[in-house]
């Protein structure tokens, strides 16, 4: 129990009345930070539900005299808010990601899918982390993954594979942990699917899982293991996106060109601003 238990319960009731299934809810690590997990469905329905979810959360909060935000990093020095996306592919009623004979219980399709998302992670970044503030969250030390790797138990990796439990083959999935809840879910889900399917179609090879805490490795150790990081700013992410043929294919030329143009403008507006940090740091000594 915590101070917001009843508020979360009221929010869940409103979501369920709107037809959005909820599986779990709890207080998260950060102060005033909460998690309400939606039950899985197909990608388009989940994108619709995500937009509805945001509206309902804000409305119930306002009704109770508080403000709800999906800003990725609303408080300095505290964990940001992520939107962990669990993904799997099905053939009819069978989970195409499951292979009981594999060490990690992952099929060839699952490995290709994960490899595709890892290979194109830097190009994807401007889609699943689409705001200047998104990159204040994607820094080491705050549970937000920044290093492009996968693992079964390591939450510092970009993609985590939840442990297999006998009898729950349908639950085999890949959890990508870098997107934030302020992204456009229609664009994010489409681009993630394109990257995953690209890996399957072109037989991308899945690298070795990283079971070590990646934050504890030195830059040299990460380099030796071939581990790259996500872009550090929106500007860097947009440059990666602008050269991506795969993302252009996923979004279509009209959306792609306009998205890149708008985001470059946003970055240019931000980077010329003077912040309180600069005034406090430099004005007294320079």
Image (spheres, rainbow, N blue to C red):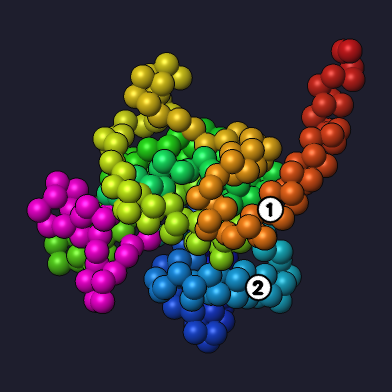
Image location of residue 279, percent across then percent down: 87, 26
The residue drawn where x is 53% and y is 47% is: 245
Q: Quadrant of the C terminus?
A: top right
Decide if residue 102 is on the left or right side of residue 133.
Answer: left
Q: Which mark is residue 257?
A: 1
Decide if residue 234 is on the left or right side of residue 157.
Answer: right
Give the secondary structure at mark 1: helix
Give the secondary structure at mark 2: helix
Image location of residue 162, percent across then percent down: 29, 53
Compared with residue 220, is residue 240 higher up or lower down, i.e. above or below? below
Q: Is residue 106 magenta?
A: yes
**Residues shaded magenta:** 87-110
Decide if residue 150 is on the left or right side of residue 263.
Answer: left
Magenta: main secondary structure equals loop
Q: In terms of image quadrants, where is residue 67?
A: bottom right
Q: In terms of image quadrants, where is residue 86?
A: bottom left
Image location of residue 177, percent across then percent down: 45, 49
Give the mark toward the camera: 2 or 1: 1
Q: Which residue is mark 2?
A: 55
């Amino acid at each position: 129990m915590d101070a917001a238990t009843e508020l979360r319960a009221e929010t869940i009731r409103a979501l369920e009345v709107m037809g959005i299934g909820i599986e779990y809810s709890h207080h998260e690590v950060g102060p005033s930070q909460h998690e309400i997990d939606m039950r899985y469905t197909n990608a388009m329905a989940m994108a619709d539900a995500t937009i509805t979810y945001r509206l309902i959360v804000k409305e119930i909060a306002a009704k109770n005299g508080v403000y709800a935000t999906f800003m990725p990093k609303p408080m300095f020095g505290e964990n940001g808010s992520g939107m962990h996306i669990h993904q799997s592919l099905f053939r009819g009623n069978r989970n195409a990601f499951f292979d009981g004979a594999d060490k990690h219980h992952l099929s060839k399709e699952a490995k290709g899918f994960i490899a595709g998302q890892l290979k194109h992670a830097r190009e994807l970044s401007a889609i699943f982390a689409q705001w200047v503030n998104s990159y204040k969250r994607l820094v080491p030390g705050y549970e937000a993954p920044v290093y492009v790797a996968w693992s079964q138990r390591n939450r510092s990796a970009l993609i985590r594979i939840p442990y297999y439990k006998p009898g729950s083959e349908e639950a085999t999935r890949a959890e990508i942990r870098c997107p934030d809840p302020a992204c456009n879910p229609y664009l994010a889900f489409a681009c993630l699917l394109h990257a995953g399917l690209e890996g399957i179609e072109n037989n991308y090879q899945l690298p070795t899982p990283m079971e070590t805490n990646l934050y504890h490795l030195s830059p040299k150790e990460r380099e030796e293991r071939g581990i790259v990081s996500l872009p550090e700013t929106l500007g860097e992410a947009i440059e990666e996106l602008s050269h991506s043929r795969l993302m252009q294919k996923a979004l279509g030329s009209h959306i792609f060109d306009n998205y890149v143009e708008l985001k470059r403008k946003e970055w240019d507006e931000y980077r010329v601003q003077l912040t309180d940090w600069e005034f406090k740091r430099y004005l007294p000594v320079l």
